[in-house]
Amino acid sequence: MTSTSGPAPLHIKIVVDATDPHAQADFWAAALRYAVEDNSALIEKLLGFGAVPAEFTVESHGRRAWRDLVAVRHPDDPYEEESGTGLGRRLLFQRVPEAKTGKNRVHLDVHSTDGGREAEVARLEALGASVVRRVKEQGGEWAVMADPEGNEFCVH
């Protein structure tokens, strides 16, 4: 229970290292049915002021985007219109030079509709994910999958 007089809860986003942040954002936007954030208005404004060089940007989905950062957000959550930045549930993909080498220490659990796990697994495979293993334990069943860059996640 939170106190109405205490400090407000902190806002978070989940940040994922990626060798190709735009491909990862496209995969996860499709996987979660999220929206890729449109930061083009802010980017164009900053380019116009000379505040950032054009090399920091790329064209993606027919609009200007940051080269090394891109986020996806839940389509029903609020977002800042001037920057396109989501104010709710978000995943941010940031470019790093190295590929993933070890097991994830944090992973996402994707929850399908009742009885829909196998259909969801098939849909995610069609988007580029792969099944790592299937788990059946006393506590339940799920599929451990990997996104196109090898990050594990579970489908329940």
Image: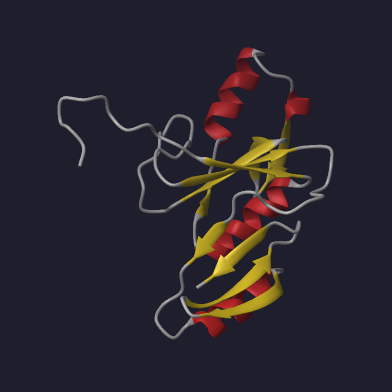
Residue 84 at x, y percent in the picture: 48, 37
Q: Nearer the viewer, residue 63 or 73?
A: 73
In the rendered view, does 46 fall on the left or right side of 13?
right
Q: Nearer the viewer, residue 14 or 37?
A: 14
Residue 90 at x, y percent in the picture: 49, 45
In the rendered view, does 80 fall on the left or right side of 24?
left
Residue 117 at x, y percent in the picture: 51, 80
Q: Residue at (74%, 25%) from the top-left corner? A: 54
Q: Is residue 81 above or below residue 108?
A: above
Residue 93 at x, y percent in the picture: 64, 43
Q: Is residue 138 above or below residue 97?
A: below
Q: Residue at (74%, 27%) from the top-left corner? A: 56
In the rendered view, does 83 fall on the left or right side of 27?
left
Image colouring: secondary structure
Q: Residue at (73%, 54%) from the top-left corner? A: 103
Q: Nearer the viewer, residue 19 or 60?
A: 19
Q: Residue at (83%, 37%) from the top-left corner? A: 97
- Identify the image quadrant of the N terminus: top left
Q: Is residue 21 above or below residue 112?
A: above
In the rendered view, does 46 fall on the left or right side of 33?
right
User: Looking at the image, which residue sits at the far front?
Assistant: 138
